[in-house]
Each structure stands twice: as C-alpha cells, then as structure tokens.
Amino acid sequence: MQDYDEDRVPHTIRCTSKWGTCNGAHATAGEVKDCWRKVRTPGAFPCSWLIELRYDDGSIYHAECGALSLETAHGYSCEAGHSHMDMQYMAERGMAYAEDSEEARRQITVGVQPLDMQGRVWA
C-alpha cells in the first residue's frame, strides 16, 4: 500500500487582499484572515521597518516587516513593536537618530540628543 503523504506537496491558499507585503499566497487560512484584517483596519498600512530573515540554507536577507501599522501623535507604530518617530517631531524636540557612537558624539556637540534605532538615548 502506498503512503500518499510521503511526498506531500505543501499547499498554499490564494489571497487577494492587496496588503502591501502580501505575496498572494499563504500557508494557512489564519494567515489569509490576518491579511484581510489588516486591509480592513481603517488607516492601517504595512510597516516599512527592515528586518533580517534567513533562507532555509542559513543565508540572510532583509525585507520590510509588513505588520499592521497605525499613525501615532509623533509618527507610527506597528503590531510587531517597531516605533517610528517622524523627523519634524524629533527636530522640534532636539532629537536625531545616530547610526553609531561616532555620530552620536557629533550630535551631542551641537546640542542634539542622539537616539539609536530602537529610540533609546545613546549612553
């Protein structure tokens, strides 16, 4: 007797939600439902924060987060926990992002409070 599950082909479910990071197919009905929930949330848009992911072979690639994002009083935040402050809000409060400690030192010398990419003040 042949086991038909032995060489099973993974199934995908077609999705037509048009969510910004949806590739049109999902592995589960729950993923499709979540995609449609995002589309139907008023004012929602996909998070553009770049995240690091890995292929099956271990190599690294970057992609947009894609989680549901909503505007806040000073920028926007997403369901995955990314928070984005808009540049005008930061400038009005004397803050700026610094990529490294060298840039943070330069900002301090001109009276700007340097923040890392998680929004924490550089020490």
Image: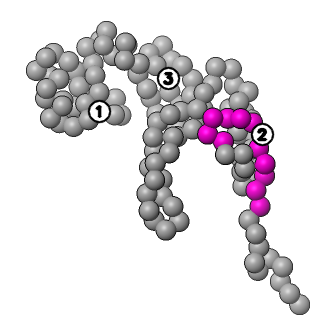
Residue drawn at the location 44% of the way across and 62% of the way down: 59
Q: What stretch is highlighted in magenta?
A: 11-22
Instruction: Assess disc 3: are there few (<14), some (14-19) or many (≥20) residues with their C-alpha within 10 Å of its C-alpha.
Output: some
Quadrant of the drawing holding the C terminus: top left
Measured Cα–Cα span from mark 3 to mark 2: 26 Å
Q: In this view, does 45 lie above or below 27?
A: above
Residue marked by disc 3: 76
Occupied quadrant, residue 69: top right
The secondary element bearing badge 3 is classed as strand
Name the element at disc 2. Answer: loop
Task: From the viewer's perspective, tell me whether residue 67 is left or right of residue 122.
Answer: right
In this figure, which residue is indicated by the disc labeled 1? 116
The disc placed on residue 90 is none
Residue denoted by label 2: 16
Earlier-in-chain disc, 1 versus 3: 3
- Please provide percent x and percent y for residue 10: 74, 65
Q: Residue at x 57, y 23 (%)?
A: 70
For the residue marked with disc 2, what is the amino acid? Thr
Q: Where residue 24 sits in the image (x, y, percent)?
A: 72, 45
Residue 26 locus on image (x, y percent): 71, 51
Q: Residue at position x 22%, y 31% from top?
A: 122
Q: Residues within 10 Å of mark 2 (few under 14, many from 20)?
A: few
Which residue sits furthest right? 1
Q: Is the magenta stretch mostly helix, strand or loop?
A: loop
* Left or right of 30 on screen, residue 103: left
Work out whether 110 lies above or below 28. above
Q: Is residue 66 left or right of residue 24?
A: left
Which image quarter holds the N terminus?
bottom right
Observer-nearest residue: 30 or 63? 63
Foreground disc of the pair 3, 2 = 2
Q: Is residue 20 visible?
A: yes
